[in-house]
Structures are given as structure tokens and as C-alpha cells.
């Protein structure tokens, strides 16, 4: 085998496709019994649509994603609708995700030496006057980037915020189709994808790797591309999914710890009816919610979105950042109860009525998932340097990719993973481009 790829997520599959197209023999080893990693599209028949347990949105007109979707013949649908903020039971239409956007951006532009968002807030926004701003900026960093304010880089936050595209899309019938397209492109050219294969050890020397699975199966190749999430890099050696390198790579492990990796819990609640369009809810909220896209609330599971422009009786709940980390060991029933309580408070519908209307529920606790152990990466003050260290190939034999190993404004996204997979394949094909 020429190249062994660890992980069949967006990065690993993209690398596999590019390598087989360049005539390389590849074998992808994937721990789970499915491809896609943090992309998990499923359809359990309860609703006439595919559902997303992981990635769902395309955050703008992103070069690599859009090109690949086109190549795969997958259409996208633009998301339109109203964003509401609900605090203390009051509904208020929101255009921005945090208060005083202009003032925050003005102050962020004054930051010359990078500090965490926590330190930035302390410097510029102390006192009662800025209580609302502090809360909404914190909620935004935790909610959108899934980060901790005391680790998130102010300079990177500003860059990402300014480069954000207003337009958001969903791939028609889900991101999973894109993963299937990558896998089929790999198979078509003789590439292998082995599922349910948990890699335990990578023993390497220049020009040769021996990859051993948890069951003792060995795979020999000339090179390996490791695409596992940051949560795997930083896990204890005995933990499920953790990989032992022989010889060890302590500088890489240390670099991984200096990068930011958040937490997230996503909850899907499917109902028999689109109850938030009912007259009773309209009366309570004093708002017409037919165009409801997103509700940002002060509830335990704070953020909820609909499938607009598709009219479907599905609400998706989102808890991320330190609050999701705190809940990571709670069992699904506790999380589900928190979700129902949140929806009940937001829409002022009793728990009993909600439960009667509930068709199905699914909880995706990614931080508790042994092959992810978190959400996606965010920029810390140390990211630029640490990422370079983690990304650097070793002896033209070990190569590294994944959403966290991408240098650009779309960090933490499918675009980042696909780009990183594409770039690492180029490095393998033309090692001189790696240095
Ligand atoms: C809940 C959630 C919602 C998200 N929403 C969006 C969104 O709307 N838009 C967006 O662009 N991005 C979103 N993201 C981020 C996006 O999903 C990721 O950035 C991207 O899918 C990561 O791809 P990857 O290939 O780098 O990693 P992964 O998809 O995590 O792939 C790595 C693979 O490695 C495997 N693996 C781990 N350990 C081992 C081992 N020891 N042996 C073998 N295999 C192993 C894993 O099982 C996994 O399949 C979301 C992420 C989450 C968790």
C-alpha cells in the first residue's frame, strides 16, 4: 500500500479521492461503522427528509465545498428566515448575533498584541453599562465557535467575523451525499475503505509505516495521513481511539493541546405538527413565527433552529462551549429533558403537550463520542504557531490533516476539512511542496 489514511471524515476522504486520482494506492482506516465522521446524515423515516447529527450548514460561498458539490451534482438551498432573541420570555427580532457589533469590532481593531476575548472584554467592557454586551459576546463565542472566551484569540475572532458570509446554505438531502461521492470516487479507482477499524498504534520509520488496529490487524504502507480530531490527539493513551506513535511524537501532542477544541451537544426534536405556527403560540409570543429560522434564548439548551425554507416539524437544539462540556457526562434522558424544558419555556407550550406532539428525538453528544471527543477547533492565541507544528510532515512519511489543520478563515468547518485533505494529498504527491 502507498498511503494509509486514518479517518474517513471529510479530510480523510478528500485526501483519498485526490490520491487515487493521482494514481496512488490508498487504504482508509475508519474506527466507526460508517464514513463521514462529524458529518452524519441519516434518515430514520420519521420525517420525509434527511437529518443531520453533525455538520448541517455551508457557511457562505466556500470555494472547495462549492466546487466539490458542483462536481458531485449536489444542489444547495439557501437559508432564509428570522432570527429572534428570547430573554425573560420576551421575543425580540435580532439581526446581529451579539449586541453592539460595531462597537465591538471597533475595539477589536485596536487590539495590536493578541489577547483572549475574556481579557479583551475586561479591558473595554467592564461595568453595568456593558452587561448585555458581555453576555451576548460570550454567548456568541461559546455558541458559534464552541470556544471558551478565556482561550479564544481576539485577533482571529475579528478576522473570522469580518470574513463571514451572510449567505448560508444546506446541501440538498444532506452533507452525507458529499461523503458518499468522495467514497465512491475512491472505490472507483481501486482505493479501499475499511470501517470498524480502530487504529491503536502507528509504528514508523522513514519511508515505512505499520499501522495496527485494536484487534491486532496490521497494515503496512509507505506513508500515513492522520486525520483524527484534536480530541483524539489530546486523549489519554489508554482511551478508546487514542493512537500511540512509535517512536513517539511528544511535540505534536503538546502542539495539539495548545489549539482550541470546543464542546457541543446537538438535539433533534421531530414533532407531528409545526406547533410554533399555531395561534396559541402566536398569542403567547405576540409574534408571527411562520418565518422562524433561529431562536436564541436564555434557556439551558439556548439555541434552536427550524428547517426553513423547508417547512418541517423539526426543531434542532444547540448547546456548545463550556456549558456543553459540563453536560457531556449526563445521560441522554437528562439532556432530552433539558431540551424539552427549554422548548416549553421558549414557546410557552406545556411539557405534556410537547411530549404528545413529539414524534422522535435524537441527542448527539459529540464531546462524549470516543472518536471525536469535542466539537471543532477554534483559534487560541497560540494557534498559528502550534498548528504549524502539528501540521508539519515527519520524515516525508507521516502527514497530518483535518479541520483543525487548516490555515484560513473557515476554521472548524467542512470547508476547512476538505481543504486540508486536498492540501495534504498534494504534499504526499509532491513532497517538495511540503517544505
Ligand atoms: C455538531 C456539529 C455541527 C457542525 N456543524 C457544522 C456546520 O454546520 N457546517 C460546517 O461547515 N461544519 C460544521 N461542523 C464541523 C465539521 O463537521 C467538521 O469540521 C468536519 O466534518 C471535520 O472533518 P474531519 O475530517 O477533519 O474530522 P472528522 O469528521 O472527525 O473525521 C475524523 C475521522 O477519524 C476517525 N477516527 C478517530 N479516531 C480514530 C482511530 N483511532 N482510528 C481510526 N479512525 C479514527 C473518526 O471516527 C472520524 O470519522 C460541525 C461539527 C459538529 C460536531
Image (cartoon, grey):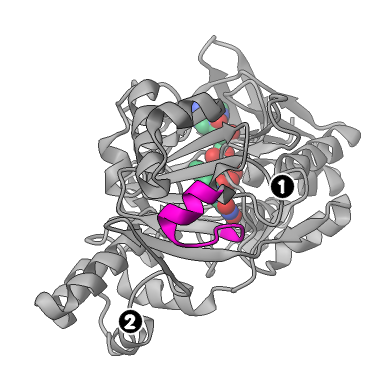
Location of residue 395 in the rendering, given as x and y in whole percent from the top left corner: 54, 47
* Mark 2 neighbour class, 10 Å CA radius: few under 14, some 14 to 19, many 20 or more: some
Q: Does any atom of ligand 1 lie closer than 8 Å to the CB of label 2? A: no
Query: Which region shows up in magenta?
Result: 279-292
| Disc 1 and disc 2 in contact, CB within 8 angstroms | no
Kindly tell me whether residue 242 is visible in this rendering. no
Residue 235, given in percent of the width and then of the height, sits at 34, 32
Which callout, 1 or 2, points to the residue nearer the camera?
2
Q: Given the current orientation, which residue lies at the most extreme top position?
A: 215
Left or right of residue 269, residue 418 in this image: right
Q: Nearer the viewer, residue 236 or 361?
A: 361
User: Which element type, helix, strand or loop, lies under badge 1?
Assistant: helix
Q: Is mark 1 within 8 Å of ligand 1?
A: yes
Decide if residue 47 is on the left or right side of residue 328.
right
Confirm whether the magenta stretch covers residue 291: yes
User: Residue at 31% of width from left, 47% of height from top?
Assistant: 299
Spatial separation of the CA atoms under disc 1 and disc 2: 40 Å
Which residue in the protein does label 1 denote? 14
Element class at badge 2: loop
From the viewer's perspective, is residue 11 above or below residue 49?
below
Residue at 38% x, 53% y is: 146
Q: For residue 270, which quarter of the picture?
A: top right
Q: Residue 107 is drawn in which quadrant?
A: bottom left
Q: Quadrant of the C terminus?
A: bottom right
Q: Tell me the residue that label 2 is attached to.
A: 100
- The answer to whether residue 279 is seen in the rendering is yes
Identity of the residue drawn at 54% across and 28% down: 358
* Quadrant where ligand 1 appears: top right
Expressed as whole percent of the image width and height from the top left, the position of residue 123 reads 14, 80
Amino acid at each position: 500500500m502507498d498511503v494509509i489514511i486514518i479517518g474517513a471524515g471529510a479530510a480523510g476522504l478528500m485526501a483519498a479521492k485526490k490520491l487515487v486520482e493521482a494514481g496512488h494506492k490508498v487504504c482508509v482506516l475508519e474506527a466507526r461503522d460508517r464514513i463521514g465522521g462529524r458529518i452524519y446524515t441519516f434518515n430514520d423515516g420519521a420525517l420525509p427528509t434527511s437529518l443531520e447529527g453533525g455538520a448541517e450548514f455551508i457557511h457562505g460561498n466556500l470555494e472547495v465545498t462549492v466546487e466539490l458539490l458542483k462536481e458531485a451534482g449536489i444542489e444547495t438551498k439557501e437559508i432564509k428566515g428570522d432570527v429572534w432573541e428570547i430573554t425573560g420570555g420576551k421575543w425580540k427580532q435580532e439581526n446581529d448575533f451579539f449586541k453592539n457589533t460595531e462597537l465591538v469590532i471597533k475595539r477589536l481593531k485596536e487590539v495590536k498584541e493578541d489577547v483572549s476575548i475574556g481579557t479583551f472584554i475586561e479591558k473595554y467592557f467592564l461595568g453595568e453599562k456593558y452587561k448585555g454586551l458581555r453576555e451576548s459576546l460570550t454567548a456568541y463565542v461559546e455558541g458559534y465557535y464552541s470556544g471558551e472566551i478565556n482561550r479564544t484569540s481576539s485577533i482571529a475572532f475579528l478576522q473570522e467575523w469580518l470574513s463571514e458570509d451572510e449567505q448560508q446554505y444546506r446541501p440538498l438531502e444532506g452533507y452525507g451525499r458529499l461523503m458518499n461521492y468522495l467514497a465512491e470516487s475512491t472505490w472507483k479507482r481501486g482505493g479501499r475503505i475499511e470501517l470498524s477499524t480502530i487504529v491503536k498504534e502507528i509504528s514508523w520509520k522513514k519511508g515505512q509505516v505499520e499501522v495496527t488496529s485494536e484487534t491486532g490487524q496490521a497494515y503496512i504502507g509507505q506513508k500515513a495521513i492522520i486525520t483524527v480530531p484534536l480530541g483524539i490527539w489530546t486523549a489519554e493513551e489508554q482511551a478508546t481511539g487514542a493512537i500511540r506513535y512509535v517512536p513517539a511524537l511528544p511535540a505534536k501532542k503538546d502542539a495539539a493541546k495548545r489549539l482550541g477544541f470546543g464542546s457541543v451537544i446537538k438535539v433533534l426534536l421531530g414533532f407531528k405538527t409545526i406547533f410554533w405556527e399555531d395561534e396559541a403560540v402566536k398569542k403567547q409570543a405576540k409574534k408571527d413565527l411562520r418565518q422562524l429560522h433561529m431562536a436564541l434564548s436564555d434557556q439551558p439548551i439556548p439555541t434552536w433552529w427550524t428547517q426553513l425554507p423547508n417547512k418541517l416539524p423539526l426543531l434542532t437544539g444547540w448547546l456548545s462551549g463550556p456549558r456543553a462540556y459540563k453536560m457531556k457526562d449526563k445521560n441522554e434522558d437528562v439532556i432530552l429533558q433539558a431540551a424539552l424544558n427549554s422548548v416549553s419555556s421558549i414557546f410557552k407550550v406545556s411539557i405534556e403537550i410537547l411530549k404528545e406532539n413529539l414524534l422522535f428525538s435524537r441527542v448527539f453528544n459529540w464531546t462524549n463520542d470516543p472518536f471525536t471527543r469535542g466539537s471543532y477547533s477554534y483559534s487560541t492565541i497560540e494557534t498559528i504557531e502550534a498548528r504549524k507544528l502539528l501540521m508539519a510532515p515527519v520524515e516525508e512519511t507521516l502527514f497530518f490533516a483535518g479541520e483543525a489543520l487548516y490555515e484560513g478563515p473557515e476554521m472548524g468547518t467542512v470547508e476547512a476539512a476538505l481543504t486540508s485533505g486536498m492540501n495534504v494529498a498534494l504534499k504526499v504527491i509532491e513532497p517538495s511542496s511540503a517544505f
